[in-house]
Every structure is written in C-alpha cells, then in structure tokens.
Amino acid sequence: MTHDLSPEAAEAITAAVESRFEHQLAFLEEVVRAPSLRGAEAGVQTIVLDALRKRDYDVETYGIDVEALRSHPAYSPATIDYADTFNVSGTKTPVTATGRSLILNAHVDVVPTADPDHWTHPPFAATRVGDWMYGRGAGDMKAGLSANIFAADAIDAAGFRLNAPLELQSVIDEEVTGNGTAAAIARGARADAVLIPEPTDEAVIFANSGVIKFRISVHGVSAHPREPESGLSAIEAAFLVIDALKKLQAEWNLEKTDHAGFDALANPASLNIGTIHGGEWPSSIPFSCVLEGRIGFYPSDDPADRMEKLEKTLKDLQESDSRLAKAAPRVDWVGTCQAGYRLEAGSDAEKALALSHRDVNGADLKRSIMACYLDAALYMNHSGIPALTYGPLTRNIHGIDECVNLPSLLRVTRTIALFTARWCGVSPK
Ligand SMILES: [Zn+2]
C-alpha cells in the first residue's frame, strides 16, 4: 500500500483546513463552554452529535453497560453510574472500499478546574488571547476533537471522498478509567489504524506508562485528645501509608534503566496522591482516612503484577508497624488499571503520519514518550490496531490556566487531514 497523495490534492486539502479554521475555532469555543466533567458529558456530546449529523455521518450513540463490559480486558474499575452519559460515533463508509480504514478518536471528559478564582480567565469561557485559547479541556482534548472533525471536513470540501471507512469517535470517561474507548472496542470498533489527537506538542507518542489507580482506606481508633494513648489517628496512619508508597515509587523508578525512553524521565512511576479525606472533628482523634491516587510502570509490565506488589507493600507495612496492624489499610482499585504500550518505529501508520507532518511543517516528526495512561493503549493492547497519539501544543493541562496554541492546532488539523487522505486514499467526488 502506498502513501501517495498528489501535491495538488494535498494543497487543496490543506487550503480547505485553513479556510475553515475560524469555524473550527467557533466550534472549539462551543465545546469548551459545555463543561463536561466525568459523568456529565451529555451536553457536549449532544453538540458533537448534532455536528456529525449535519455532516451526513451515520451517527450512533451508546452508553457504557458496566455489567457487560466488566469481563472485557479493556475495562477498568468504574466508580460512577453512566446512566446520564454516552459515547458518540459517526461513520462514513464508501460503497466500494479500497483503502485502509481509520478511527479518529477523542475524549470529551475533562478534569476538575480546582478553584476557578485562580484562573486568569474563567475555565469554561473559552477566552482567546493572541495565539492561545484558555479553558478546561481546551487542550485536553477538545482541540483534538475539533481537529478530527474539521480535518475530515476539509477532505470533503476540497472535492474528495475517502476510499475506506472512517469513524469519528467522541468518547467519555478517559480521565479516570478509559471505559469510553473500552466500550467502543467491546462494541466492535475496528480499523486499520487509530489516531488520537491528545496534547502531544506535535510529536507522536511511541510509548506510554501502564497505570493503576487506587483508593486506600485506613481506620484508626477514635478517642478524646485528653487520652491520646487510647486512640490511633487514621490521618497519621495514612502518612505512613504514603511514605511506604513513596518507597515503592523509588523502587519502580530504579527499573527505568531497563526501559528505553523511560530512562530519560526523572520520575516515570510518578506516584500521585490526588485526594485525601480524613477525620471527623478537630478535637477527636480521627477514625477514618481515605486517600486516592495513581502510580505508573512500564509498557511490558502486567498491571496485575503491579497491583499485587502494591498490595504486598501495604501488607508488609501492616506486619512491620503495630499502628498499621490496627489501621488495616484496605485497597480498592478505582479507575484505570491498564498496561502501557510501545509503538515500534517503522509502522505504515506512523510513516503516513510522518509524511503528512513533513508536508505541513517541513521537518521530521518527533517521537516522544508519555508517562501516563492513554486510550491508544486499549487499541494497541486489546485490538492489535496501530494507534497514533499526536496532537497540538498546550500549556497547563490538568492545571490552572490550561490553554491550547491555535497556530499549532491549525498545523495539527492540516496534518490529520493529509494523514487521513493518505491512509484511507481519496477519489474525486
Ligand atoms: Zn486527554
């Protein structure tokens, strides 16, 4: 299979991206202004659904049926009810398919804003300042969602149709579990390649971490502070748990020398205690403390082994410290429990992306690593489909003042349009 695309076709397609870019930014503003925290994605998904309907995609929506999904290897433990939220899929299938099929995937859920008063611009206002658009989810990854839709638009507007099926997927609950994409896979989504425009600063991701997410509950002995010896503080016991997890992080980081790419990262395991809730009253020794977090590992590792190691760390702690023997830390797995992946160099999909990136940027496509969970891992590990994670330049994703660089978004949209045309093949309409 070749990667041929005539210079005239490439020119017409990139020109069509450029001429629609203001419309693309208007769409991006609209979706950023639809807050879509986990479980509350229905508003933004309705906007996406309408956008795909207008473009004559065969559109379907479907929810996540946890009971049906639970036995699938792409499933990660869910902690919410998905009753009010859903995935959106739009497909276009040629009468006679001759090229290679493609899925363009993006997640629409966003992480919480922290205190909105600390943002320079309100987090759901989609404020544009110079080359940047601010907003929670602007970079991670509603810009990518807009790139998928408008890249496909440009091919159509330039007078071409694709020679192979294209599916646009707008999925939910990537940030905590990955179950949106897991549901798409379990439902039968298949293609010859997948592209996911997560914020990657215009590099393609060649490896990511496996990740497990946990909730650890510790119980103390509540008592009056006038009798401290009769109590056991659950909060202080939780500190001991955190210290033990930090030691585990240090141990796992030592393994990085065996994992090309990860050896260049300072802290590939990246233990994060993301939430902690403890205690009942300022003058009672706390009975309960619950902490939640994540820790990462290497693409060749089995998540089940890492979960076992974390559980053993807590068991050893309990046996070595009488305070912890009483506190009996309990682990529940809540969220992503998935392996990482490695995209070996030289795949056809990456070649087509590199050619398209070069057409747009006049430079080689950089390969980069991400020490976090990516939905691409589910396609790579559970479907055997080459998955390219490649998207725009951003700042402060998951932080205060998240923003996306708009000239970068334009370049990425052009590159995705050329990649889609190259991969699927195009014919004049
Ligand atoms: Zn993301």
Image (tube, rainbow, N blue to C red):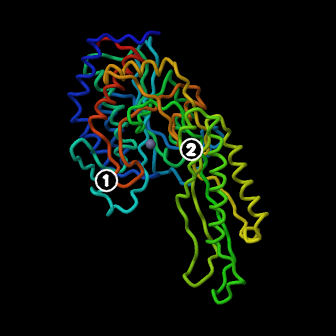
Determine which of the numbered discs, if any, sits on residue 169 in the image.
none
Secondary element type, mark 1: loop
Residue type at mark 2 is Pro
On whether ligand 1 comes within 8 Å of the CB at mark 1, the answer is no
In the rendered image, is residue 68 in sight?
A: no
Q: Position of residue 277 (x, y in %)?
A: 55, 68
* Badge 2: residue crowd in 10 Å (few <14, some 14–19, many ≥20): many
* Badge 1: residue crowd in 10 Å (few <14, some 14–19, many ≥20): many
Q: Residue at x 42, y 37 (%)?
A: 198
Are discs 1 and 2 less than 8 Å apart at CB?
no
Question: Residue 203 appears in which quarter of the rendering?
Answer: top left
Q: Is residue 7 above or below residue 363?
A: above
Residue at image mark 2 = 268
Q: Is residue 381 above or below residue 70?
A: above
Q: Is residue 110 above or below residue 299?
A: below
* Quadrant in which the C terminus appears: top left
Ligand 1 location (quadrant) = top left
Determine which of the numbered discs, if any, sits on residue 124 in the image.
1
Q: Position of residue 287 (x, y in %)?
A: 64, 75
Q: Is residue 117 above or below residue 180?
A: below
Q: Residue at x 68, y 45 (%)?
A: 306
Q: Residue at x 30, y 21 (%)?
A: 155
Q: Residue at x 45, y 27 (%)?
A: 103
